[in-house]
């Protein structure tokens, strides 16, 4: 019996059709809907390749005397919780709750695939519903495909929802 459905949420345009299908499945099975949003923590400087061989760039405290003054604003601040995303997730939770489903929101930080899988384990998800493409090809080339990572883990059943572009 299906009791818990996990839906990774990235606020991309493809998310709408994924949520619509997940909501239908949750209602049909009277299952809980769990939304998970992961903020990936960046551990690298803003432009690491551009700073090689140029001491002081990106680190104002190490600026060269007599060189261009570097403002502290040039340093990437640590990622603080994004209030806009948090309220987006809360709004989404409220909106989906109005349809009669029991909806839970999970805010995570870390590696996207790992955090999605960890959340799935914690809630004992019976199904993960996600889009086959949430980001553009450049994002997938640089970061790697979240969908592919979830599929390779082979831990839970996964339902892939094609984006509108793929179904045309």
Image: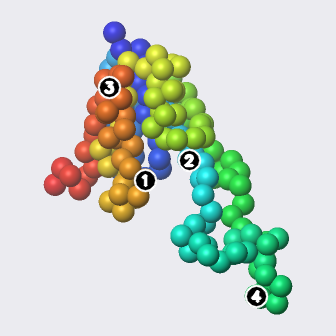
Residue under pointer 3? 154
Asked if marks 4 and 1 touch (Cβ < 8 Å), the reply is no
At horizontal 70% and vertical 75% (from top left) the residue drawn is 55
Say left or right for 104 vs 126.
right
Horizontal and vertical percent for residue 21? 32, 35
Instruction: Look at the picture and state if 116 lies above or below 166.
Output: above
Q: Position of residue 82 (x, y in %)?
A: 66, 51
| Cβ–Cβ under 8 Å for marks 2 and 4 | no
Q: Which quadrant would the N terminus be assigned to in this image?
A: top left
Farthest-out residue, left: 168
Gap between marks 4 and 1 measured at Cα: 33 Å
* Horizontal relation, residue 69 to residue 82: left or right: right
- Determine which residue is flagged by label 2: 40
Kindly identify which residue carries mark 4.
68
* Of the image marks 1 and 2, the number of the one nearer the N terminus: 2
Which residue position holds label 1? Answer: 143
Mark earlier in primary sequence (2, 4): 2
Between the C-alphas of marks 3 and 2, the distance is 22 Å
Q: Residues within 10 Å of mark 1 (few under 14, many from 20)?
A: few
Q: Residue at x 25, y 52 (%)?
A: 164
Q: Earlier in the sequence, mark 3 or mark 1?
A: 1
Q: Is residue 165 visible?
A: yes
Q: Is residue 13 visible?
A: no
Between the residue at mark 3 and the residue at mark 4, the CA separation in whole angstroms equals: 52 Å
Of residues 67 and 121, the one nearer the viewer is 67
């Amino acid at each position: 019996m299906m009791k818990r459905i996990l839906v990774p949420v990235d606020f991309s345009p493809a998310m709408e059709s994924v949520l619509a299908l997940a909501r239908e499945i949750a209602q049909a099975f009277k299952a809980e809907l769990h939304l998970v949003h992961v903020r990936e923590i960046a551990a690298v400087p803003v432009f690491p390749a551009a700073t090689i061989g140029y001491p002081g760039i990106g680190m104002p405290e190490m600026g060269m005397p007599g060189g261009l003054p570097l403002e502290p604003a040039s340093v990437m601040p640590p990622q603080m919780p994004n209030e806009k995303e948090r309220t987006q997730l809360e709004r989404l939770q409220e909106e989906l709750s109005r349809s009669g489903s029991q909806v839970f929101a999970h805010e995570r930080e870390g590696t996207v695939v790992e955090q999605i899988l960890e959340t799935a384990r914690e809630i004992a998800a019976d199904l993960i519903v996600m889009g086959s493409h949430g980001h553009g090809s450049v994002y997938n080339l640089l970061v790697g495909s979240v969908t592919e990572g979830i599929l390779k883990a082979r831990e839970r059943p996964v339902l892939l929802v094609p984006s509108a572009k793929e179904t045309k």
